[in-house]
Image (tube, rainbow, N blue to C red):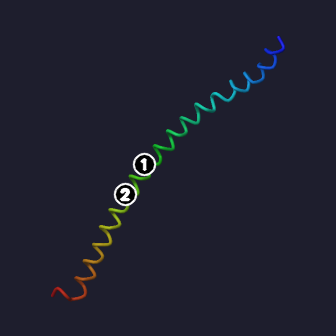
Amino acid sequence: MSKLLKLYPAFILGSALLPLVAGAQQLNTILNNVGQTLRNVIGVLFVLATVIFLWGVIQFIAKSGVLS
């Protein structure tokens, strides 16, 4: 009986921590989804910044009179 009483607190503690492990897996999934979304948004922003930069270069060259 004394061995059972010694294991009881460990069982209660383990049972209490088990949902935290499951929650950590869910949190990991959420963080992966957020990370993937941010990578996609950053890629689109780089493409947009490149297009805007090139448009500015074209306007600069056009206004300089080199092409006319």
N-terminal of the two: label 1 or label 2?
1
Residue 24: give x, y in percent of width and height: 58, 36
Q: Is mark 1 on a helix, strand or loop?
A: helix
Image-quadrant location for residue 14? top right
Name the residue at 30% across, 76% down.
Answer: 56
In terms of depth relative to the viewer, which is nearer, 31 or 15?
Answer: 15
Query: On the rendered image, what quadrant is the C terminus found in?
Result: bottom left
Q: Mark 1 points at which residue?
A: 37
Image-quadrant location for residue 58? bottom left
Name the residue at 79% across, 14% down.
Answer: 4
- Left or right of 65, for residue 41: right
Q: How crowded is mark 1: few (under 14 residues within 10 Å), some or many (20 or more)?
A: few
Query: On the rendered image, what quadrant is the N terminus found in?
Result: top right
Q: Name the residue under label 2.
A: 43
Q: What is the three-letter code of the residue carrying label 2?
A: Gly
Name the residue at 32% across, 62% down.
Answer: 47
Q: Is residue 32 above or below residue 12?
A: below
Q: Is residue 13 above or below residue 55?
A: above
Q: In this view, does 3 lie above or below 39?
A: above
- What is the count of numbered marks? 2
Residue 27: give x, y in percent of width and height: 55, 39
Q: What is the three-letter code of the residue carrying label 1?
A: Thr
Residue 39: give x, y in percent of width and height: 41, 53
Residue 51: give x, y in percent of width and height: 29, 67
In terms of depth relative to the viewer, which is nearer, 68 or 26?
Answer: 26
> Mark number for residue 2?
none
Name the residue at 21% across, 89% down.
Answer: 65
